[in-house]
Image (spheres, grey):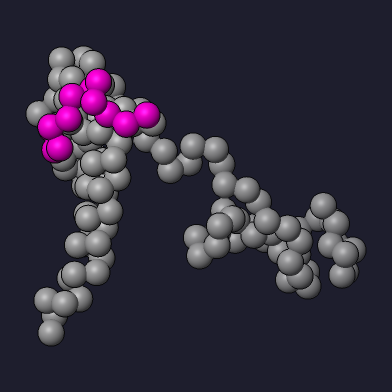
Amino acid sequence: MICSQCGNDKKFNVLERPDTPHDREVRCGKCDSFIRWLPKPKNKDKRPKNKILPENLGIDYCQLCLRKKDRLGKNETLTSHHIIEINKHGEDIKENIWVVCTHCHALIHHVRIYINYHWKDLWKA
């Protein structure tokens, strides 16, 4: 890397930028000019895949809408949903798993986000 402003090729500052879609920003150590963005490392925020699958639990229906696996839509499947999220100290155990169809899974997460992030402001008033 070479700074196009001052020609520096030795010292660069790398700044974390969680406020952007990028991971880090590289700036010149001499003139502080922007050099480039560094991509996020692959799988940085991902956790291991859920090991408890609906097939392993012997459940062949959605526990929310009660549709059987053979009654799901064309692009729908049964998925495992953590009742208490892993990032909220929930465990990856069968007692913390609910088998839901992909439609209900999306609905659960939409409602969870809506309640957690939007409704809490209503209760302050």
Tell me if residue 12 can be seen. Answer: no
Along the line of sight, the residue nearer the viewer: 2 or 37: 37
Taking 61 as reference, is 90 above or below it?
below
Tell me if residue 115 can be seen. Answer: yes
Q: Is residue 35 magenta?
A: no
Q: Is residue 56 left or right of residue 29?
A: left
Boundaries of the magenta span = 63-74
Along the line of sight, the residue nearer the viewer: 68 or 28: 68
Taking 89 as reference, is 114 above or below it?
below
- Image x and y of residue 100, in percent: 21, 33
Q: Is residue 72 magenta?
A: yes
Which corner quadrant of the image does residue 95 belong to?
Answer: top left
Which SS does the magenta portion mostly show? loop
Q: Is residue 84 left or right of residue 30?
A: left
Which corner quadrant of the image does residue 68 belong to?
Answer: top left
Q: Is residue 62 left or right of residue 76?
A: left
Residue appearing at x 25%, y 48% in the figure = 107
Taking 123 as reference, is 51 above or below it?
above
